[in-house]
Image (tube, grey):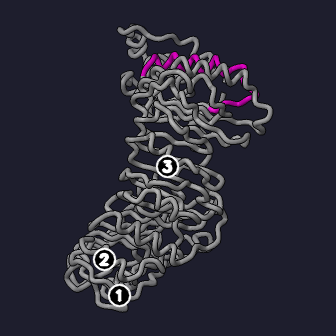
Amino acid sequence: MGAYISILRNSGPLSDGQPELSNLQTRHPGGLPPELLAEIGSFLPYPTLYRAVCVSRYWRAALLASPRLWDDITVCLLQKRKDRWTDVLELLFARNAGRPLSMTLGWVNDSALDTDWVALDSISALVASHMWHMKSLSLQIPYRHDMLLLLVPAPILETLEVVATDGTGPKWLPVDLFAGIAPRLSSLHLDEAELPLQCPALRTVTKLALISLYMLCEPHLRSKIAYLPLLDEFKVSVLDLDGYRDVGTGPPCELALYLHLTFAPGLESMLALFPRARRVSYDFDRAFRNAPDPDPEDVAAAVKRAMHTVPNPTSIHIRWEPPVVDYPDALTVVLDDRLVIEHVELFILKPALNIELIQSVFVSVTSLTVPEELWELFELCTLLPNLDVTLFVSQASTESRDPGCTPKLYLNARYAPKSIRSLALARPPKCFYSEDAPHWILSATLLEEFVASVVAPGSLQSLLLHGIVLDGTATFDSGDLVARTVADLVTPEVDAARRSVNELVDWEFLI
């Protein structure tokens, strides 16, 4: 840590002409221009960036001369190092040089009871002096509503996140938040923090997220939402088994919102508050709450509402989510790139996807992604010709499989083959989460039999195997059709979740 502070303090800003940089570049063996080094540095987490600064005088000059590398600051405050907080943050602010700044303030401490509020108040005052160029702010430190950084104008702030989960009682945003001046504030995320009844700084908010570890008890929710006239998206996550206990009564909200709600008891009362919601999606996550299996009729009603919020979709993607330790395997349902259901287990979703519902949604669908366990439901329906289909192959737990064992396709076409233009077989994310996970080996004969039973003759033009290789050459009714092995099917969500917890920690600067 001392070395990082020394580097930041002793490398002053370079002049516009950058004579020192030019002189050093001629002697640097790599000969990389400073603009390219700055671009490389923009992809590095903070600890790696600081190590890069130590490589040579040229690298130090080039990286520290680029303010944009310091446009996104993530620091985690360690109370045992409180004597360094101000020094380090002042140096980081200096390197940012007044550019629009995104900042996350985290906290590591065993107990909220011994919080040094004097030291935190000094940090709050320092951050407050830079709110004039703060674009995004995430507060994950012990919270008080009278913190100075919440009481000064924030003229370019667009996103505010308050995570007040230190266990010291209810929190709330001040009514005079940002002195009423936050004209660009559009996204507000409150975790265990309450929304004020009337707050001028929030009148421009279009996206609101409320997260509660306990039941949602907001008798004045309707009144509070009324003071957010531009609200367009509203997300509520309730982790308590009691769900939505008291969300108020009275006239419903007239805003045509996009609602994203936790599937929990009392859900109907939330929906009744927003009868004009243009779209509703549901989070079925039960792992944290350790909730019992939901009522099938309630699930069916929620799934039906969600599937009908996107009129005449052309694509339906039911994907496995990235695996999470100690969490059950779960699915996400996306219609035309719009999330409608997430964190739902297969045994909960499958009974709700009855043939009548699928047929009513499938009028215009030309692209379908499903686990093979659900294919039989779609096989019963009338599908459009020339369909693009991706099937996630069902497998036993990878922990019990030998790397080279032959996977089995359990699909059996019990009904008429479908007109499928392109077919892809993919492994679920849990089976290739390791970067060096070996390909599965599939019997060419088994693939031939499968294609012959599922696909109408002459319709198939493309056959892809994601992370799967054949043990021989497969032949099909179309002589020029070849099964091609390609990379595993990875969605942006899987890419983001692929980082391990340790890698994510590397993006924090501990001070």
Mark 2, residue position: 360
**Quarter of the picture holding the C terminus:** top right
* The magenta segment: 76-99
Q: Position of residue 226 (x, y in %)?
A: 44, 44
Mark 3 or mark 2, which is nearer the start of the sequence? Answer: 3
- Image side of residue 288 versus residue 355, left or right: right
State the separation of the CA atoms marked 1 and 3.
Answer: 58 Å
Q: Secondary structure at mark 3?
A: helix
Q: Secondary structure at mark 2?
A: helix
Q: Position of residue 5 (x, y in %)?
A: 62, 18
Residue visible at 73% across and 40% down in the picture: 168
Residue visible at 56% across and 76% down in the picture: 295
State the separation of the CA atoms marked 1 and 2.
Answer: 31 Å
Mark 3, residue position: 222
Residue visible at 59% across and 65% down in the picture: 265
- Main SS class of the magenta portion in the image: helix
- Mark 2, other Cα within 10 Å: few <14 / some 14–19 / many ≥20: few
Contact, mark 1 vs mark 3 (Cβ under 8 Å) = no
- Mark 3, other Cα within 10 Å: few <14 / some 14–19 / many ≥20: many
Q: Residue furthest toward the right?
A: 114
Above or below residue 225? Residue 421 is below
Amino acid identity at mark 2: Ser
Residue visible at 64% across and 71% down in the picture: 292
Mark 2 or mark 1, which is nearer the start of the sequence? Answer: 2
- Residue nearest the viewer, comparing 468 with 396: 396
Residue 449 is marked as 1
Q: Position of residue 382 (x, y in %)?
A: 27, 83
Q: Secondary structure at mark 1?
A: helix
